[in-house]
Amino acid sequence: MTPFDSSDFVWPVFSQGMLLGLGLIVAIGAQNAFVLRQGLRREHVGSVVVFCALADALLITAGVLGMAQALGERPALSQALALGGAAFLAVYGWRALQRARQVSALDVTTTGLRLSRGAALAQAAAFTLLNPHVYLDTVLLVGSIGAQQPVPLQGWFAAGASSASLLWFGALGFGARWLAPWFARPRAWQVLDELIGVTMWVLSALLVRHVYWGL
């Protein structure tokens, strides 16, 4: 039997983590609107982007490593959570495709007093850490899916999911003046939701295949 070589799977696992991260984070929401607003106002953009990306990375890493440890001796629970994650992704994808049929846009208000760096980071922390969905997405969902990967590849999966946050928040913050008019168009979000829906279904199918066939 050929020995397992994790290096052959680094890029596919990293890409799977990145696609999952992008699928979960690219949506109309308060956190994205705040990062885009700061980018438009050019206020502490780097600090806000780094904070949001770092917070996601820490939660994702904690989720993957924590879930891997918790599920290491419980294969039945691991399989059940993986199938639950697949179901969640399938429903998430369906909801994204349903959103694509609606007209919506990201409304960003740039008026108001200038924020200090501390105030900007405090608001970023509130939008990030006080949202209960962030723990469901990063710790439970991403963590349980990442825990299905072989031990040498779990870090690469977490890195892929974390890089999605860095790329997205960086694009929102530093590309705000170019992206804001685009995100104000309902069709732009419809296209994004269509892509997210298909991506979530593909990831769901891959997870089911992994559970039943180990592929």
Image (cartoon, grey):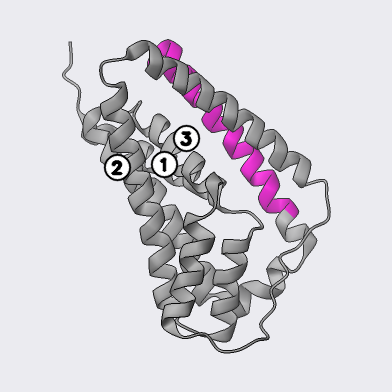
Inter-mark Cα distance, 1 to 3: 11 Å
* Residue 11 in sight: no
User: Eyeballing the image, is 1 above or below 7?
Assistant: above
Query: Which residue is identified by label 3?
Result: 141
Three-letter amino acid code at the position of disc 2: Trp
Q: What segment carries the magenta color?
A: 190-215
- Classify mark 2: helix, strand or loop: helix
Q: Quadrant of residue 63?
A: top left
Mark 2 vs mark 3, CA separation in Å: 16 Å
Q: Is residue 147 left or right of residue 95?
A: left
Q: Residues within 10 Å of mark 2 (few under 14, many from 20)?
A: many
Name the chief secondary structure element in magenta.
helix
Identify the residue position indicated by label 2 in the image.
Answer: 156
Percent x, y for residue 106?
71, 65
Q: Which percent across, then down, holds residue 44?
A: 45, 82
Mark 3: which secondary structure? helix
